[in-house]
Amino acid sequence: MEIVKSGNDILLKGVSCFDLDKTFNCGQAFRWEEIEKNEYIAVVNSKIVHLKKDGDEVRFFNAGYDEDFLIDYFSFDMNYDDVLNKINTDSHMKNCIDAGYGIRLLRQDLFETILSFIISANNNIKRIRKIIYSLCENYGNSIEYMNKTYYTFPTKEALKDVSKEDFFSLRMGYRDGYIYDAVEKINSGEVDLEFIKKADTQTAKSELMKIKGIGEKVADCILLFSLSRYELCPQDVWIKRIFENRYNVKATTFKKGNNLAYNKWGEYAGIAQQYLFYYEREVANGE
């Protein structure tokens, strides 16, 4: 991959395995907005990220950041073609890879991912996006870009004195108590984000599960989509169905070293999960 700086833009050439639609709409992130085909915008870590893809070139407009930020967030330091070759272990997975080629797992801010996936539990994408937007509009900072106002995701400090009733007013339902609990425990240090980042995966999961509303599946999602714990395969009804129908295995638990996902796809079980999920939702439903 070649990096070229052109004025205020950053152009990446020779980018492989990166489909914007599939990456931003696969259920791992909720703030990416499509402007037109192959062009998206979002606020990422308090920065406006505006990109357009043309073939194997990706242009980042008005980039107020350096290429290291992009490489980390979009995991451009990973060779996804090599990863996909490693998880291409059976005919069904080959079909999933062919259909979902271009999905990349992002490395999102941990605090934002925690709150976003608490909100996502038993919720639909449209409502998740609306609640998160309201949270950002009310407690984030505004950024003007291309004659439009965008909002950063609020910091833990910005939410420190927000009441449960205030969260409820954002129409997040019963999740108001979970969000309140998360903010309180993170601000008090009872749940230590820096410790979670450095801890082994099982310890990090236990730390996250101190927060009300975070069970095993949500904890797995947070660690997979924020801290690149790729060995984790979050369990939901889709994945249960896939394991039962496609692999004839009762998917009751997904503990490392003792489940089909890890045994088949090892350190990249979580990436395999995303391709399995995409195929089932986008292709198999239309069969």
Image (cartoon, rainbow, N blue to C red):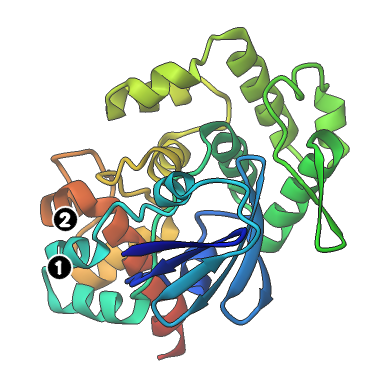
Q: Please identify, in this view, whether the residue under mark 2 or under mark 1 is nearer the observer.
A: 1
Tell me what residue is drawn at x 84 percent, y 41 percent: 170
Q: Is residue 263 left or right of residue 112?
A: left
Q: Would you call the spot at circle 1 few (<14 residues within 10 Å), some (14-19), or many (20 or more)?
A: few
Quadrant including the N terminus: bottom left
User: Would you name the residue on which mark 1 appears?
Assistant: 85
Residue 56 at x, y percent in the picture: 39, 77
Identify the secondary structure beneath mark 2. Answer: helix
At 86% from the left and 38% from the top, the residue drawn is 138
Name the residue type under label 1. Asn
How many marks the image carries: the answer is: 2
Along the viewing direction, whichever of 86 and 245 lies nearer the viewer: 86
Instruction: Give the x, y percent position of residue 183.
Output: 66, 22
Left or right side of 33 for 190:
left
Q: Secondary structure at mark 1?
A: helix
Residue 175 drawn above or below residue 243 = above
Question: Distance of mark 2 from mark 1, alpha carbons?
Answer: 11 Å
Residue for badge 2: 265
Q: Quadrant of residue 92?
A: bottom left
Q: Residue at x 88, y 37 (%)?
A: 169
Q: Position of residue 187 (x, y in %)?
A: 64, 14
84 versus 267 height, above or below: below
> Residue placed at 60% from the left, 40% from the top?
45
Q: Is residue 277 above or below residue 224?
A: below
Q: Is residue 98 toward the left or the right of residue 3 in the image?
A: left
- Residue 124 in view (yes/no): no
Q: Residue furthest bottom?
A: 287
Q: Quadrant of the C terminus?
A: bottom left
Vertical order, 115 against 221 (above or below): above
Identify which amino acid the numbered label 2 is placed on: Trp
Q: Nearer the viewer, residue 206 or 79?
A: 79
